[in-house]
Amino acid sequence: MCKLNAFDWIMLIVVFIGGINWGMVGFFDFNLVKAIFGDMTVAARIVYAVVGVASLYLLLALITKCSSKKEM
């Protein structure tokens, strides 16, 4: 089983929130980040960047932490 530390959980929550935002964009044409921070302001760009970095981190964590051989 893959073990997650506190930082992994935080990154997972960030990616989850980002996924919900993109779901709202796709289904309802409503961008929550844009509504809160404005259209491509510095704060909005930081939020998008953090979600992007979190997704890359989780991808690497999945590959490195969860791909070890299963114990028998």
Image (spheres, grey):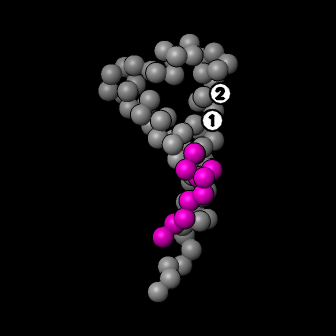
The residue where tag 1 is placed is: 50
Work out whether 67 lies above or below 26.
below
In what element is the residue under mark 1? helix
Residues under numbered marks 2 and 1 in contact, where contact means CB atoms less than 8 Å apart: yes
In what element is the residue under mark 2? helix
Which residue type does callout 1 highlight? Val
Question: Residue 27: x and y, percent?
Answer: 32, 27
Q: Which residue occupies the foreground of this view, 8 or 53?
A: 8
Q: Which residues are magenta?
A: 1-11
Which residue type does callout 2 highlight? Ile
Query: Residue at left 51%, top 66%?
Result: 2
In terms of image quadrants, where is residue 69? bottom right
Question: Residue 51: x and y, percent?
Answer: 57, 37
**Residue at the limit of the structure toward the bottom, as seen here:** 72
Question: Residue 45: x and y, percent?
Answer: 63, 24
Label 1: how many residues lie within 10 Å, few (<14), some (14-19) or many (20+)?
some
The residue where tag 2 is placed is: 46
Query: Residue at left 47%, top 35%?
Result: 17
